[in-house]
Amino acid sequence: MDRQTVYDYIRKKYKTEPEYLWRKFPGYAAFRHADNNKWFALSADVVGEKVGVPDQEMVEVVNLKVDDPFFRDMIIQEPGIMPAYHMNKLHWITVLLDGTVPEERVFDLIGMSYMATASAKKKEKIRPPKEWIIPSNPAYYDIVHAFDDKEEINWKQGAGIKKGDTVFMYVGAPVSAILYKCKVTETDIPYNGHHEKLTIKALMRIRLQKRYAAERFTFDILKSEYGIYAVRGPRGIPNSLSEALKR
C-alpha cells in the first residue's frame, strides 16, 4: 500500500486527479469534488515521528474526513489511524500508507470521506439504496388487486425515491396494512394525467417482490410495535421493522 495506489484508486473510482497546490511541499496532493471544490482527501509525505512512526525518516499518509466525532473516536483506535496531522483533529483523520492499514480499509475510509464532503445533490445521487413505506389509497386505485395479473406497475413517484430503492406499500382503510414489498426499477417517468384530489408530476415503475398477509403489518401493529403513527407520504422505516419485513 502506497500513495500511488491511492492515486490510481481515486482516479478510477471518482474520476478525480491530484492537485499539487504547494511549491514548498511537492509531495502533498489534494483531491476535491468538481461541484463544490471541497477536499475529500489530502495525501502527504511527513516526518515519521510526527505521525507516530519514529523509526521512519519519512512516511506516506492520507488525510480523510469523518463527520461523526464519535465514529472518529472509534476509528482512531485502529492501528495506523490517528487524529489528523496538520488539519482539524475533530473531523479529520490521518491514515498511514505503509501497509499497517489494509488496502480495502483505506478504500472504505476514502469513500466515507468522499460522502462526508459531497454536496447535498451528490449525496442523494450516490447514496446507497433505501427502504421506504409509501401510502396507497384504495379509493383512488385498486391497489389490493394491482398485482393480480402483472408484476410491475407504474406508481406516483415520491420525493427522494430513486431507482434501486425498496418500497413497502401501505394500503389505507379499510385494509390499513402493509401488503407489498416492491423494488423501484425506473423513476422520472413523465406523466400528463390528472386526478381531482392528486397532484402527480412523475411516475416510478415498481416490481413486486413479496406479499404480506393483511393481518401481519396492520396500522395498529406498526403503531404499537414500531412507533409509526401515520403514513401520509413516503417515509423511512426503523431497523426493527426492516428486519421484520425481511423475515
Image: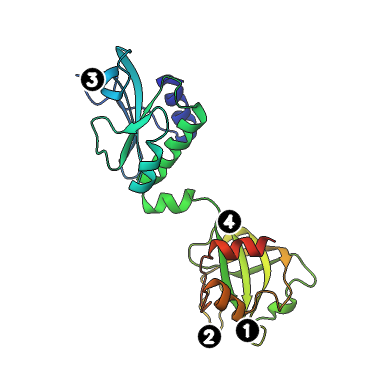
Distance from Cα at disc 3 to Cα at disc 2:
63 Å
Which residue is most to the left?
A: 24
Q: Which amino acid does label 4 sit on?
A: Lys
State the quadrant of the C terminus.
bottom right
Q: Which of marks 1 and 3 is in front?
A: 3
Contact, mark 2 vs mark 1 (Cβ under 8 Å): yes
The answer to which of marks 4 and 2 sits earlier in the sequence is 4
State the residue position of label 1. 140
Residue 18, compared with residue 165, is above or below; it is above
Seen from the viewer's position, the closer of residues 227 and 132 is 227
Distance from Cα at disc 3 to Cα at disc 4:
44 Å
Q: Where is residue 201 in the image (x, y as percent from the top left)?
A: 51, 71
Q: Where is residue 232 in the image (x, y as percent from the top left)?
A: 51, 78
Contact, mark 4 vs mark 2 (Cβ under 8 Å): no
State the residue position of label 2. 197
State the residue position of label 4. 163
Disc number for residue 69? none
Q: Can residue 68 be seen in this view?
A: no
Q: Where is residue 126 in the image (x, y as percent from the top left)?
A: 48, 48
Distance from Cα at disc 2 to Cα at disc 1:
9 Å
Q: Which amino acid does label 1 sit on?
A: Tyr
Secondary structure of residue under mark 4: loop
State the residue position of label 3. 25
Seen from the viewer's position, the closer of residues 174 and 32 is 174
Residue at image point 57% right, 73% down: 225
Secondary structure of residue under mark 2: loop
Is residue 116 shown left or right of residue 165?
left
Residue at image point 53% right, 81% down: 198
Q: Can residue 173 be seen in this view?
A: yes
Q: Which of marks 3 and 4 is in front?
A: 3
The answer to which of marks 1 and 4 sits earlier in the sequence is 1
